[in-house]
Image (cartoon, grey):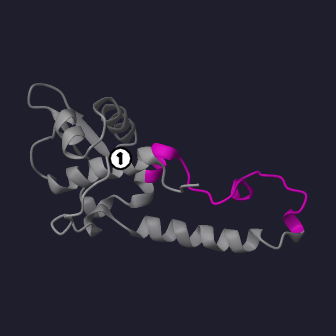
Amino acid sequence: MDIIRKNTDYAFRLVSALTGSYGQLPVSVRKLAEDNYVPYELARKLLQQLSKTSLVKSTQGPRGGYELSRAPDEISFIEIIEAIQGKVRLNRCLLPGFSCPLKSRCPVSGHLAALQKEIEFHLSDKKLSDLNLAGNNEVIEK
């Protein structure tokens, strides 16, 4: 099971591209989709989701497109993940209100909860500005 789903991976590609153009003109959905190997319709949908959570903003018109709503050092990885796929959870037993008959004596849940906190911490701590866009010469899988 992937913790980061394929649509979230695509969303990271799109916001990474927007990070590279931060402070410049908006970038069209078509250009973002083509340059980052994301199907056009899916790119539109993902950018709309990111817009609803105010991570990106759109500009209408012939020179319109998308841009980051905030500086790259103000947008964390966890915000992007949660905008696309919701909360990251290792196990449903970590969900609020989950009822399990073994909860008080489970040998695993405490360890999973500690790991969950570590994951959340690191994803919250990692910002878009931490990406090394200039040094990224690896080929992106289609």
Q: For the point 14% across and 40% down, which residue is it?
A: 26
Q: For the point 77% across and 71% down, which residue is it?
A: 108
Above-or-below relation of 42 to 101: above
Is residue 67 covered in magenta? no
Characterize the local packing of mark 1: few (<14), some (14-19) or many (20 or more) Cα atoms within 10 angstroms.
many
Q: Position of residue 92 (x, y in %)?
A: 71, 53
Q: Position of residue 39 (x, y in %)?
A: 31, 35
Which quarter of the figure has residue 34? top left
Is residue 102 covered in magenta? yes
Relative to residue 87, is residue 21 drawn left or right? left
Which quarter of the figure has residue 33? top left
Q: Which residues are magenta?
A: 81-104
Q: For the point 8% across and 31% down, which residue is it?
A: 63
Q: Position of residue 75 (x, y in %)?
A: 33, 58
Q: SS for tag 1? A: helix
Residue that label 1 marks: 11
Instruction: List the single residue furthest toward the top.
Output: 61
Relative to residue 14, is residue 63 drawn left or right? left
Task: Give the residue type that dot 1 points to.
Answer: Ala
Relative to residue 12, is residue 108 drawn left or right? right
Front residue of this view, candidates 37 and 21: 37
Above-or-below relation of 48 to 61: below
Counting every numbered tag in the picture gives 1
Q: Position of residue 103 (x, y in %)?
A: 85, 63
Above-or-below relation of 51 to 132: above
Q: For the point 31% across and 32% down, which residue is it?
A: 44
Q: Quadrant of the N terminus?
A: bottom right
Above-or-below relation of 37 to 126: above
